[in-house]
Image (tube, grey):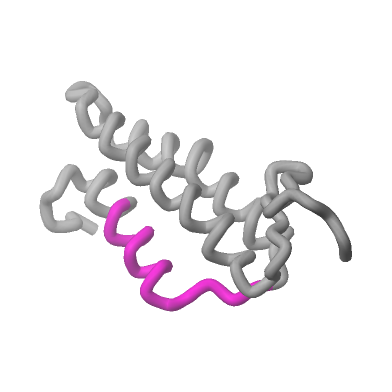
């Protein structure tokens, strides 16, 4: 494939020249965006447990699932653990899970 730009963005997925960087280029910005969104949502004091769960279901999971479906690369195990830690910390407000 011959093109002059370093990468090409198509339907929300960045396609780099070197396909070995495909995972890093797409999951890196997504992880930082998810982290900043969760940090910003933590500042809202009146969210109930069900509201927090719904925020994750409607905002974070669709973004992750879209990339899982469109990119033919494996995601590292520690990346899943990191996302799980951020999401559970957000849902339980930094406390131990009650269920």
Task: Give the vertical position of 5 relative to 2 (above or below).
Answer: above
Image-quadrant location for residue 2? bottom right
Which image quarter holds the N terminus? Answer: bottom right
The residue lying toward the viewer, choosing from 11 and 80, is 11
Q: What residue lies at 30% left-to-right and 30% top-to-bottom? A: 41
Tell me if residue 84 is in the magenta stretch: yes
Count of numbered circles on the image: 0
The range drawn in magenta is 73-86
Task: Give the vertical position of 35 relative to 72 (above or below).
Answer: above
Image-quadrant location for residue 84? bottom left
In this image, 8 relative to 27: left or right?
right
Considering every residue shown, the one lying at the far front of the view is 4
Tell me if residue 72 is in the magenta stretch: no
In this image, 92 relative to 38: left or right?
left
Q: Position of residue 31 (x, y in %)?
A: 43, 52
Q: Position of residue 78 (x, y in %)?
A: 37, 74
Considering every residue shown, the one lying at the far left of the view is 95
Q: Position of residue 76 (x, y in %)?
A: 47, 76
Secondary structure mostly seen in magenta is helix
In this image, 71 relative to 1: left or right?
left
Q: What residue lies at 63% left-to-right and 74% top-to-bottom? A: 20
The residue lying toward the viewer, choosing from 26 and 54, is 26
Q: Position of residue 73 (x, y in %)?
A: 65, 73
Q: What residue lies at 53% left-to-right and 64% top-to-bottom? A: 24
Q: What residue lies at 24% left-to-right and 58% top-to-bottom? A: 99
């Amino acid at each position: 494939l011959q093109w002059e730009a370093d990468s090409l963005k198509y339907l929300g997925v960045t396609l780099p020249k070197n396909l070995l960087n495909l995972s890093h280029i797409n999951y890196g910005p997504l992880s930082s965006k998810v982290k900043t969104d969760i940090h910003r949502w933590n500042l809202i004091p009146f969210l109930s447990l069900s509201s927090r769960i719904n925020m994750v279901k409607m905002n974070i999971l669709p973004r992750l699932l879209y990339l899982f479906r469109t990119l033919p690369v494996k995601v590292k195990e520690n990346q899943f653990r990191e996302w799980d830690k951020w999401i559970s910390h957000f849902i339980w407000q930094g406390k131990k899970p009650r269920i």
